[in-house]
Amino acid sequence: MDIDSFLSVMGWMSVFVSLLLAFFLITVKTQNKLANRLFALYLLFFAIDNTGIFISESFVKAHFNLEFFRWTTCAFTLPVFYLYIVSVCFTDFRLKPKHLVHAIPFIIINAVFVFRLYFLSDVDKMQFYEHRSQMPEFYSFQLVLALQIVFYSIATFSVLKRYREIYQENYANPKTSIFKWLFQISVVFFTLYYLSIAKNVLRFTPFESLWIWANVFMQFWALIVTCWFVLKALNHPELFRGIDSKLELARDILPKVNVIEINDSKNEIISAQISALKQYMIEKEPFLDPSLTIQELSNQIEIPVRDLSVLINHHINQHFFDFVNEYRIQKAMSILKNPLKSDLTVLEILYEVGFNSKSSFNTSFKKYTNLTPTAYRNAS
């Protein structure tokens, strides 16, 4: 099998897997319909782009305008992926007319193609297609796509950074966090996209064989990544939960609640609130609830959620996530040291103290004790 045939086979496989997953995401019953549909749309544009690997020259020459339009659909791929990330992170996200701004590059490219390509004669279209690597329109098109990669990589990781900060300040259940998954998929995807920039540069050089092998490499990894996403989505459906984007970070609340200028009486109030909060955590043990949020703790202790957020994240100088997990670890440590509970397994203990993930429990436990739960029990 030659390289072109190998590329064609991988292209067919990649398109098939992408369309199959897109169909599944559109038809499956779920509460997270918008995120599923956005990712299905991303996969559709990804598949359209990949069809260029195995489309025959005869088909292209019979449908030049369709092929030129297919090129322009690449301008939708990253915007849709970005909107997918936002929709998974924040449950209150909705598509609005303002999001049509993401279609501007697609509109501009097609506007240029209308005047420069779509209405040319078949002979001129043929000449453009066969010498496209030397055409200024094609240079400009590749530049727009490269700029999109840079812009949307920055935008995507900015969203993930905000999601992580909001999550740590308002939630205490490590299993519901999707940050790690979204970060992984974003790193993998944008690594491939930045590699594609390097690959496309080779198109404009004399090293044609190197460009062909770069295509093989990119196509192989695109197929691997697509299959990886399918397996991840099927095995970990809990990853697709979001948070409310309207939740505020403590640093954003501080100026509004006027805690910058603190006098002695204010210090006494804050100290009393911290003492009452810690006493409540010890006596009532609300951290045993694995789904505890700062809003629920606020309702229990009767401190406004904004004040409680500032109290924990600013005055105690801990994220809510770490604040709650510290009490869980202390509870676990007391159980592990208790000879009367030596028959309890580590798995039973982690569920008892409010964790619902063994990996998260082990990570948090080692963070506070520098030991694994088993090593701590043996040392006690």
Image (spheres, rainbow, N blue to C red):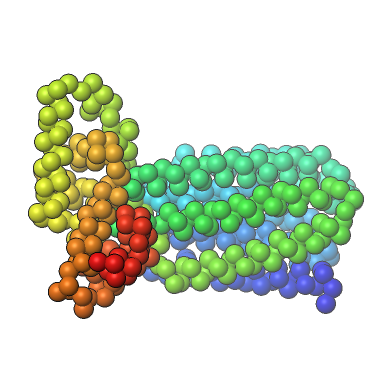
Please determine whether, in this image, residue 362 is positioned above or below residue 139. below
The spot of residue 307 in percent (x, y) is 20, 36
Residue 65 visible in image: no
Work out whether residue 180 or residue 243 is closer to the camera in this orientation and state it: 180
Point out the image quarter for the N terminus.
bottom right
The spot of residue 245 in percent (x, y) is 35, 44
The spot of residue 363 in percent (x, y) is 37, 60
Horizontally, residue 186 falls left or right of residue 300, namely: right
The spot of residue 89 in percent (x, y) is 40, 51
Work out whether residue 90 or residue 292 is closer to the camera in this orientation and state it: 292
Question: What residue is shown at x 52% (from left), y 49% (from top)?
Answer: 82
Please determine whether, in this image, residue 208 is positioned above or below residue 245. below
Question: What residue is shown at x 48% (from left), y 42% (from top)?
Answer: 158
Question: What residue is shown at x 40% (from left), y 67% (from top)?
Answer: 237
Work out whether residue 197 or residue 49 is closer to the camera in this orientation and state it: 197
Residue 288 visible in image: yes
Question: What residue is shown at x 41% (from left), y 43% (from top)?
Answer: 162
Please determine whether, in this image, residue 64 is positioned above or below residue 153. below
Q: Quadrant of residue 31?
A: bottom left
